[in-house]
Amino acid sequence: MKKTLLICLAFFPLSLLFGQQEPLFAQYKTNAFLLNPAVAGSSERHELRINYRRQWSRFPGAPETAIISYHGSVDVKNAVGLLAFNDALGPTKRSGLQFAYAFHIPIGMKEDKLALGMAAKMMQYRFDSEGVYFQDPSDAAIAEAAQGLMVGDVAFGLYYYNEHFFAGFSAPNLIQTDLDLGASGSSRSIVSKLYRHYFALMGYKFEYENFSVEPSVLVKKVQTAPYQIEGTVKMYIVNDRIYFGGSYRTDWRMSLLFGFHTRNLHFTYSADFMSKPIEVPGTVFGPSSEITLGLDLGGTRW
């Protein structure tokens, strides 16, 4: 029983299919700070974002992820960011906080900058046993899992950007903290850990007279899983206030998105579809939905 509960916790929330332990969003460019701490302070404003994703809308207990984040510049070179997140996959839950710092270095005579970012996070894994049938309800592992498991780790990121071009690399879970649950000391049973992830992002915004086009690519790698590559194309119209686009990922997933923004408010909606259905007899997964709400706060500095 203990090992079953630990595996459920360790590979939560998206490893069910793809070996991912970090929450991933189709709208990665809408809030790239979720992937890379070096993005903090790279825009001209302080950004407050709320991201929500509901995976497989017709599958009971499917993954849900909610994140609220903020980042902005303290001065010309220094920036900070903070995010709080909550994941749910059936009876397993994960929630936590992450604090980020980024240092921005001007490159050459142009407006190019290179940012170096670090982040530290603390999170709790827990198991909600209500409504779950156990062969042995008195098993101590059930109570231990319900109490939760606190773990921490760090991330590193690089981000190069200017008005039109951006490229970044980040690596969450650098320490690869062990996930264990049990009594204490040497009697604790370690069955898994936070696996190191690697994200590489690059894109360019082409501006024309009445519209703009922004192709981008995101490459993801987890030590225990194959590479994933996601290509996205966004088109901006009406002075960049309205945008729409689509993406395709090497795990057969397609996404369509639409969004708009005013001077301070942002809204983006996207839906994911599997071009090659997941074949599980008697199970219907359905599409996935994702929403981003944003508020830009003031000018470029506090």
Image: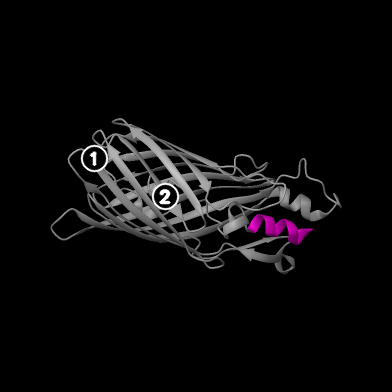
Where is residue 129, by image quadrant?
Answer: top right
Question: Is residue 112 found left or right of 3 in the rendered image?
Answer: left
Q: Which residue is mark 1?
A: 211
Q: Main secondary structure of the magenta part?
A: helix
Q: Which mark is residue 38?
A: none
Residue at x-position 86% and y-position 52%: 135
Q: Tell me if residue 53 can be seen.
A: no
Residue at x-position 31% and y-position 42%: 235
User: Is 239 above or below relative to 72?
Assistant: above
Viewport quadrant of the C terminus: top left
Q: Position of residue 218 (x, y in %)?
A: 40, 57
| Residue 244 is one of the magenta-drawn residues | no
Question: Is residue 261 found left or right of 131 in the rendered image?
Answer: left
Residue segment shown in magenta? 1-10
User: In the rendered structure, which amino acid carries the disc numbered 1?
Assistant: Phe
Q: Which residue is mark 2?
A: 247
Crowdedness of circle 1 by 10 Å Cα count: few (<14), some, many (20+)? some
Question: Could you say which is closer to the camera, residue 6 or residue 281?
Answer: 281
Question: Could you say which is closer to the camera, residue 205 or residue 295?
Answer: 205
